Image: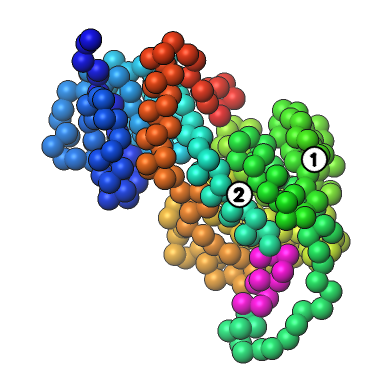
């Protein structure tokens, strides 16, 4: 049996998490960890697979024998938009833990806005004891999820468990049992019914800057929450932050929870940090579990070596 060729790992994650996960990963083949300075000048021409998140641009010129590229996250725009890539399969990270984490964030934020979390946090700081009247139920609130891939579909199901009225939108028509869905032609109808808009779209040419004043102004503003609310945990490039800020100031949007930004880390001078109607989280909605990532890669390599097709392969034309 011939010796297996290496997996090259180039992940801009917390160094300790990568090192710890590699201790038990890929036991049957060599691993080249590009975070180790000893590998900086190593010949990579023998590497068979690459696991990457925002890798060194030279990686793909050096690793000329690759069979597949594995993204370290659910998104792949960090690869498609920034590198000259070989004509190889690119595989998205799809895993229960990643999906659960994203849905937890979405449900948490929807409940926070439903139950007046921002207002009560302000009252706590001011030491004000006041129950806000006319608390709507989840069933009275329509949550519109934009992006119905693996993450979006799971968020839809878990929001329904919490009792929300949930509708979905994707550029191409998708069917989800028990959920009204819309495609590109139905965007206006979708927005007009939505009280809380959840952004889980991938970043493509079609979605770049899609969350702008024109879109926010079409959301339902006379609903049970007293205004429309925006949550974005998809991609920062899908929102026009200057217009988002202005809409939060002038009442086009009542409030927002934002996990992703046009430029990360978020600039310390950004008004979003201090706006009283905004919740900021540091791209932490669905942080990749590195051990789960490596298990996912191992499973896909095993499929390939067994003569089975790879799963979760990116459509480069669509961008996801």
Residue 107 image point, x, y percent? 65, 55
Q: Sequence order check: which comes first, mark 2 or mark 1?
A: 2
Report which quarter residue 83 is drawn in.
top left
Majority secondary structure in the magenta region: helix
Q: Which residues are magenta?
A: 112-121
Residue 240 image point, x, y percent? 61, 49
Residue 294 image point, x, y percent? 37, 35
Can you say whether 135 is above or below 303 in the image?
below
User: On the picture, is 284 further left or further right than 145?
Assistant: left
Report which quarter residue 163 is drawn in.
bottom right
Q: What SS does tag 2 mark?
A: helix
**Residue at x-position 77% and y-position 47%:** 166
Classify mark 2: residues with Cα within 10 Å, few (<14), some (14-19) or many (20+). many
Marks 2/1 in contact by CB < 8 Å: the verdict is no
For residue 103, the mark is: 2
User: On the picture, is 177 further left or further right than 100?
Assistant: right
**Residue at x-position 46% and y-position 26%:** 91
Residue 135 seen: yes
**Gap in Å between the C-alphas at discs 2 and 1?**
17 Å
Front position in the image: 51 or 270: 51
Q: What SS does tag 1 mark?
A: loop
Front position in the image: 281 or 251: 281
For residue 21, the mark is: none
**Residue at x-position 40% and y-position 29%:** 297
Front position in the image: 125 or 317: 125
Q: Magenta includes 111?
A: no
Can you say whether 257 is above or below 206 in the image?
below
Residue 237 seen: no
Q: Label 1, on which residue?
A: 179
């Amino acid at each position: 049996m011939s010796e297996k060729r290496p997996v090259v790992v180039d992940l801009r994650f917390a160094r300790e998490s990568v090192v710890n996960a590699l201790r038990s990963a890929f036991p049957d083949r060599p691993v080249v960890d590009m975070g180790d300075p000893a590998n900086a000048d190593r010949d990579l021409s023998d590497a068979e697979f690459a696991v990457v998140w925002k890798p060194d641009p030279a990686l793909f010129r050096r690793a000329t024998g690759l069979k597949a590229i594995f993204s370290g996250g659910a998104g792949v725009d960090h690869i498609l938009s920034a590198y000259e890539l070989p004509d190889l399969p690119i595989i998205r990270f799809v895993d229960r833990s990643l999906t659960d984490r994203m849905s937890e964030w979405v449900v948490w934020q929807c409940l926070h806005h439903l139950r007046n979390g921002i207002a009560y946090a302000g009252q706590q700081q001011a030491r004000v004891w006041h129950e806000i009247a006319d608390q709507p139920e989840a069933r009275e609130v329509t949550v519109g999820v934009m992006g119905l891939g693996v993450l979006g579909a799971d968020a839809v199901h878990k929001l329904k468990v919490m009792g929300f009225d949930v509708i979905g939108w994707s550029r191409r028509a998708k069917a989800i049992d028990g959920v009204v869905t819309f495609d590109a032609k139905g965007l206006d109808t979708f927005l007009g019914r939505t009280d809380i808009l959840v952004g889980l779209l991938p970043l493509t040419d079609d979605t770049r800057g899609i969350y702008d004043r024109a879109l926010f102004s079409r959301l339902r503003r006379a609903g049970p929450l007293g205004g429309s609310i925006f949550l974005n945990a998809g991609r920062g490039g899908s929102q026009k932050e200057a217009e988002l800020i202005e809409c939060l100031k002038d009442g086009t949007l009542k409030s927002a929870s934002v996990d992703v930004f046009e430029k990360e880390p978020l600039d310390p001078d950004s008004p979003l940090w201090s706006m009283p109607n905004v919740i900021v989280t540091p791209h932490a909605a669905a942080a990749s579990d590195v051990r789960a990532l490596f298990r996912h890669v191992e499973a896909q390599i095993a499929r390939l070596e067994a003569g089975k097709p790879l799963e979760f392969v990116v459509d480069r034309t669509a961008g996801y």
